[in-house]
Amino acid sequence: MDFTMQQLEDMNELDRLYLFEDIPEEDLKAHLASLPEDEQVALLTLIPEEIRCDMGYLSDQEMAYSKVSVRYARGPAELSDFGGFSGRYGQKYKDWLEAYCPEEFWELVFKKELGAVCKAKNEEVADFIDDTVKALLAKNPAPDQNTHFLEHVGHMNALQAQAEEMAEPLMFGGCQRGELGIPKLERPVATRGRGKNMFFNGTQEDWEDFDRVADEDVLKEFF
């Protein structure tokens, strides 16, 4: 293969995707088969999820789910384990956890702590946004509500949007949404009955079709 592990580690997600897209699947499988197990694991973690799944390996979600469910000796996750609606901002945090931190997400699911954690995050973010709107309003007062109603509403909506954008790092691991990169949702699991993740590129029907827990025979071993 015309790459080194160090070169792969130094690349960003998109550069690795472009690299592996140009390598024939059979050549890549043969290279993986020639490596010792520890080197296989290291390389597989750097192969973009989309390509890895097409080769028949588990997705990031499937790996995280399997690992955590074994740790807690649990059967399939139940709908109640996801904690229900966690508020507007808590739901965004929940979606971010699943899409970008799957092992932490499934840990919270199986500990039945996901709902409480996300509701606490919802309160934290809502308080931040309220305080930020007040601070912005002090610097840039709104038009009089009684004499310029539409202008007042437009001004307040603009401040709310600005405050919500400033709050994104609280919900998305210190990043703005546009900085997050590719979500780990190539093949999500336990999707049936749940609203689709905001980072999932598909419809609600597409989302629920990925229910890998109800169809465990679909799952393959990582090696």
Image (spheres, helix red, strand yellow):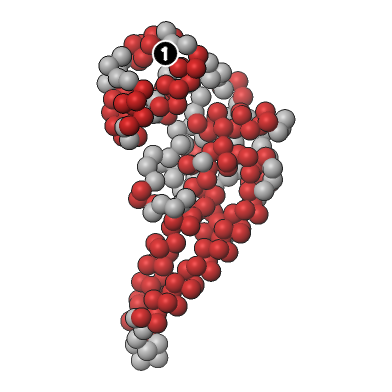
| Direction from residue 74 to residue 205 in the image, left or right | left
Q: Is residue 170 visible?
A: yes
Residues packed near mark 1 inside 10 Å, few (<14), some (14 to 19) or many (20 plus): some
Q: Residue at x 56, y 37 (%)?
A: 103
Tell me where residue 189 appears, x and y as whole percent.
56, 34
Mark 1 secondary-structure assignment: helix
Tell me where residue 63 appears, x and y as whole percent.
55, 28
Q: Quadrant of residue 218?
A: top right
Q: Quadrant of residue 182?
A: top left
Q: Residue at x 35, y 76 (%)?
A: 154
| Direction from residue 90 to residue 134 in the image, left or right | left
Kind of residue at badge 1? Leu
Residue on which the image places disc 1: 32
Q: Residue at x 58, y 64 (%)?
A: 123
Q: Quadrant of residue 151?
A: bottom left
Q: Is residue 152 visible?
A: no
Label count reads 1
Residue 79 position (above or below residue 4)? below
Please, which residue is most extreme toward the bottom here?
Answer: 147
